[in-house]
Image (tube, helix red, strand yellow):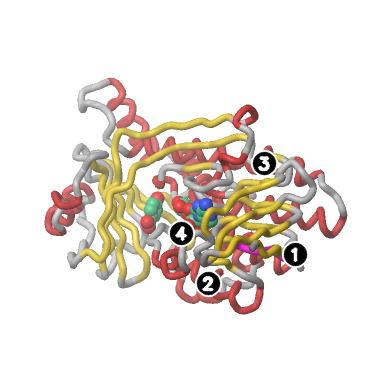
């Protein structure tokens, strides 16, 4: 037996992209249904970075879910960069008049789920075998199974917000899609610990032993990363070894105040640059990781999901309120124009800060020269600040 439901926008995925889109559509009186493969507990337990550009904060304000973000988010005016023990600061506020807000993606997701469940509309958790149908028609639909019962959700539009491993991107005709990809020959070993951060702001460190990053979730919870081999085994990295390596790579004069403590999460993740074009076909529109992936060095992943959602929501509002479909037709080109700039910046930060070449190679010399130029140039720091704090939506 199949039950049939209907909505205006069918959204696949209850990550930041799907949840933020659903909330913004609701604010503008547009109905949606979210189909999520995982459980609520699983989605809310995912540990992910959260360095929010001002544009993303503004979208959360527009969505009416920014109260806790403003209470608990940490507003940062800049970042620190350490190069072979020499540290300098890039001051976003002074250089480009912008700040970033450190607020875990997990928290952002919880805030959006709470708003959704307070009456915005359904999230179908543990929706199995979601499949897309009729994306070239004026009445596409989503089929899925829930607790053994088959369902069909008829909608006007489908938003594919189901991340890199979702079913939306494969639904676009392969003959009309192109993908661009760069994988990196190293990974990031991340550790989460309930210890105070070693610095008031994030520290990105380039070192002969490899890249490291000192970040945070709150004044009492720290997040650190070290560049490692792709096949690194967690069991070879007891906490003490991680803390020792962080002190070596983040070392500067004066040294950062690294407080050690037991890890509550430790994992190795690969880095990837990926873009699939176009980001739309017929009545299907991709947003967020479903269409693109950036290496985490530039802290752009969450913010690109937000800017995609901004463009898609604006286009859907124009359709429903003004019967104007020009923004929908231009969605992919509009979103990709910003995606490619963020891909470039994330790739540039990754190539600049990681140990990639033999110490005495020409390429390593070029890295050192660029870092030395960055350390001493207001123009170079302004370019970094402009991109890190977020290009305009
Ligand atoms: N059916 C239903 N839901 C699915 C399916 C499917 N076939 N496949 C994936 N999903 C769900 C996932 O369980 C996840 O909850 O889609 C959601 C996708 O969320 P994200 O992967 O977080 O992607 P997005 O919302 O675009 O957010 C991008 O997340 O991965 C980080 O660094 C990334 O910060 C960026 C942000
Ligand atoms: C994080 O806090 O997890 C984080 C911060 C900045 C990055 C990447 C990850 O560039």
- The local secondary structure at tag 3 comes to strand
Instruction: Find disc 4 in the rendering and name its residue.
Output: 77
- What residue lies at 64% left-to-right and 43% top-to-bottom? 335
Instruction: Find disc 1 in the rendering and name its residue.
Output: 30
Q: Position of residue 165 (x, y in %)?
A: 47, 46
- The answer to whether residue 254 is left or right of residue 309 is left
- The magenta segment: 30-34
- What residue lies at 68% left-to-right and 38% top-to-bottom? 333
Q: Position of residue 325 (x, y in %)?
A: 82, 47
Residue 269, compared with residue 216, is above or below; it is: above
Say the numbered circle drawn on residue 280: 3
Please tell me which of labels 4 and 1 falls first in the chain.
Answer: 1
Answer few, some or many: residues within 10 Å of disc 4's Cα (few below 14, many 20 plus, some between 14 and 19): many
Foreground: disc 4 or disc 2: 2
Instruction: Find disc 2 in the rendering and name its residue.
Output: 111
Tell whether circle 2 marks a residue whose Cβ is less than 8 angstroms from ligand 1.
no
- What residue lies at 53% left-to-right and 31% top-to-bottom? 179
Tell whether circle 3 marks a residue whose Cβ is less than 8 angstroms from ligand 1.
no
Answer few, some or many: residues within 10 Å of disc 2's Cα (few below 14, many 20 plus, some between 14 and 19): many
Please tell me which of labels 4 and 3 falls first in the chain.
Answer: 4
- Most common secondary structure along the magenta stretch: strand
- What residue lies at 44% left-to-right and 59% top-to-bottom? 50
Give the distance between the C-alpha atoms of the residues marked 4 and 1, in whole angstroms.
36 Å
- The local secondary structure at tag 2 comes to helix
Please tell me which of labels 4 and 2 falls first in the chain.
Answer: 4
């Amino acid at each position: 037996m199949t039950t049939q439901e209907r909505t205006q926008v069918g959204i696949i995925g209850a990550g930041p992209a799907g949840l933020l889109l659903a909330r913004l559509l609701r604010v503008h009186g547009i109905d949606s249904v979210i189909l999520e493969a995982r459980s609520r507990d699983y989605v809310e337990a995912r540990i992910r970075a959260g360095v929010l550009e001002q544009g993303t904060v503004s979208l959360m304000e527009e969505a009416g879910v920014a109260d806790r973000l403003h209470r608990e988010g940490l507003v940062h005016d800049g970042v620190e960069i350490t190069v072979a023990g020499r540290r300098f600061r890039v001051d976003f506020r002074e250089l480009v008049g912008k700040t970033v807000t450190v607020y875990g993606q997990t928290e952002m997701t919880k805030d959006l789920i709470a708003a959704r469940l307070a009456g915005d509309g359904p999230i179908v958790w543990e929706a199995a075998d979601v499949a897309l149908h009729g994306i070239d028609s004026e009445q596409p639909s989503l089929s899925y199974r829930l607790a053994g019962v088959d369902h069909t959700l008829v909608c006007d539009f489908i938003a594919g917000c189901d991340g890199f491993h979702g079913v939306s991107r494969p639904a676009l005709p392969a003959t009309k899609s192109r993908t661009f990809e760069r994988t990196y020959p190293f990974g990031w070993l991340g550790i989460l610990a309930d210890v105070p951060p070693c610095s008031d702001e994030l520290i990105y460190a380039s070192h002969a032993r490899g890249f490291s990053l000192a970040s945070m979730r709150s004044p009492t919870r720290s997040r650190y990363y070290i560049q490692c081999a792709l096949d690194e085994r967690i069991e070879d990295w007891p906490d003490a070894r991680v803390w020792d390596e962080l002190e070596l790579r983040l070392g500067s004069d004066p040294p950062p105040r690294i407080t050690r403590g037991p890890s509550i999460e430790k994992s190795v993740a690969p880095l990837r640059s990926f873009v699939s074009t176009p980001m739309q076909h017929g009545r299907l529109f991709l947003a967020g990781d479903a269409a693109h992936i950036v290496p985490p060095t530039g802290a752009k992943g969450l913010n690109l999901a937000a800017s995609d959602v901004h463009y898609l929501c604006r286009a859907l509002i124009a359709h429903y309120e003004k019967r104007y479909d020009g923004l929908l037709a231009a969605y992919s080109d509009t979103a990709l124009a910003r995606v490619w700039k963020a891909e470039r910046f994330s790739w540039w930060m990754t190539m600049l800060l990681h140990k990639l070449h033999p110490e005495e190679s020409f390429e390593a010399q070029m890295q050192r020269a660029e870092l030395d130029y960055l350390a001493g140039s207001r123009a170079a720091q302004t370019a970094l600040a402009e991109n890190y704090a977020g290009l305009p939506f």
